[in-house]
Amino acid sequence: LPHSLTHSLTGACVLEQLFQAFVISAEMSALVHIVGRLFKDVVNTLVIAGLVLLSVAAALTALEDPKFANIGVSCYELVKFALQLESPPMDDIDPFGASTLARPFQPMPQRPPHSPLQSR
């Protein structure tokens, strides 16, 4: 057998033995059950987020904006915006709106170093 296939089979067998150890022990089987329910909740949340993404992308596509030509491009743009991979364009926002959205950086005021002589 090839070297990589041997490692894969060994890893699968070790994983199977670990799973059997979790199922045999009462405490570990409860942990497996809890992790399984957690995984199910995460999947349900991702499905709902995907449905919301598709519905918003469909609405953007229905607006017939050239930037959102089809639903695939709309989904791609929404994911880029949600992950903050690029900043949103602020060309169409008036100056007052831009000033309320983007505040300038204000550094924290620095306290002077504490001197033991000042406390007397």
Image (cartoon, rainbow, N blue to C red):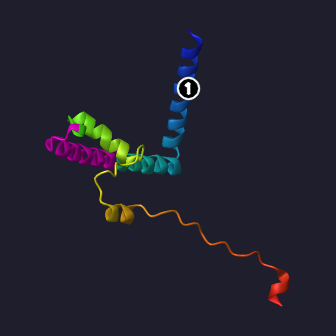
Q: Position of residue 27 (x, y in %)?
A: 52, 51
Tell me if mark 1 has few (under 14), some (14-19) or many (20+) residues whose alpha carbon lies within 10 angstroms of its own: few
Examine the structure image and report whether residue 49 is included in the region drawn in magenta. yes
Compared to 99, does 35 lie above or below?
above
Examine the structure image and report whether residue 98 is included in the region drawn in magenta. no
Quadrant of the rendering where the C terminus is positioned: bottom right
Nearer to the camera, 116 or 55: 116
Nearer to the camera, 117 or 91: 91
Per the rendered image, the range of residues in magenta is 43-66
Q: Is residue 63 left or right of residue 31?
A: left
Q: Residue at x 27, y 48 (%)?
A: 48
Q: Secondary structure at mark 1?
A: helix
Compared to 20, does 56 lie above or below?
below
Compared to 111, does 90 lie above or below?
above
Residue under label 1, please give it. Answer: 11
Q: Residue furthest front?
A: 95
Quadrant of the rendering where the N terminus is positioned: top right
Q: Amino acid at mark 1?
A: Gly
Q: Main secondary structure of the magenta part?
A: helix
Q: Residue at x 37, y 66 (%)?
A: 100
Q: Position of residue 13 (x, y in %)?
A: 53, 26
Q: Residue at x 76, y 74 (%)?
A: 113
Nearer to the camera, 40 or 22: 40
Q: Residue at x 41, y 44 (%)?
A: 86
